[in-house]
Image (cartoon, helix red, strand yellow):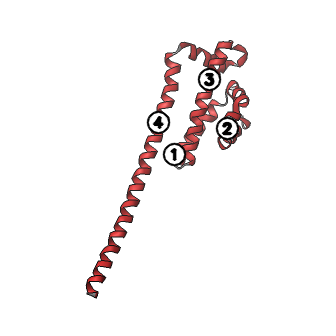
Amino acid sequence: MRHIDNWMNAAASIGVLLGIVFLGMEIRQNTEMMRSQARDAITEKQMMFSEWVTTEPDMATALVAANQGTDSMTPDQFMMFAYFMAGVWREWENSYYQYQQGLFQGNEFQARMRRWRSQMQMPAAASQWRATREWYAPDFRAEVDAIVAAQ
């Protein structure tokens, strides 16, 4: 009887260990899926911003004017640019959050940061950021503030 109990305990222990291994594999697979979905969603948003510029002549004109400086912008262009940048920064904030949650790899995020630095070199973007920076999460705000300060 004792021999059977030992075998039952051993089998139960092996079952628990296998269950833990299986659970770990499922969690890893779920994390990879979340990374993939996060990256896909962020890429889709970036493509949407690109589509606006390529299909909306007024948006393209507003961005060209912003690149030349806010003095050359009409009120309509300024408003269009302001809302466009608010959308861009909200997407950046989401990317930053996803990175903080471990859903973005460091090398992928560093490439995004280079893009951010490039875009924030535009004086109109930096100016608009300073005017609206309080709308964003403190950690993200500090990251973009550092980019603007380094310009």
Residue at 50% x, 31% y is 45
Q: Quadrant of residue 64?
A: top right
Count of numbered labels shown in the rendering = 4
Apparent side of residue 51 relative to residue 119 in the rendered image (left or right)? left
Q: Quadrant of residue 20?
A: bottom left
Q: Amino acid at mark 1?
A: Phe
In the rendered view, tell whether residue 19 sits above or below residue 151: below
- For disc 1, the marked residue is 104
Distance between the alpha carbons at the discs numbered 3 and 4? 20 Å
Which quarter shows the C terminus? Answer: top right
Distance between the alpha carbons at the discs numbered 4 and 1? 12 Å
Instruction: Using the image, tell me which numbered label, if any, was put on residue 144.
Output: 2
Q: Amino acid at mark 3?
A: Tyr
The residue mark sitting in front, 3 or 2, is: 3
Distance between the alpha carbons at the discs numbered 3 and 2? 17 Å
- For disc 3, the marked residue is 83
In the rendered view, tell whether residue 114 sits above or below residue 6: above
Instruction: Using the image, tell me which numbered label, if any, was put on residue 32.
Output: none
Whichever of callouts 4 and 1 sits on the residue coming sooner in the sequence is 4
Answer whether labels 3 and 2 touch (C-beta < 8 Å): no
The residue mark sitting in front, 4 or 1, is: 4
- For disc 4, the marked residue is 41
Q: Quadrant of residue 81?
A: top right
Distance between the alpha carbons at the discs numbered 4 and 2? 22 Å
Whichever of callouts 3 and 4 sits on the residue coming sooner in the sequence is 4
Q: Amino acid at mark 4?
A: Ala
Distance between the alpha carbons at the discs numbered 1 and 3? 26 Å
Neighbor class of circle 3 (other Cα within 10 Å; few <14, some 14-19, many 20+) is few
Answer whether labels 2 and 1 touch (C-beta < 8 Å): no
**Residue found farthest to the bottom:** 2
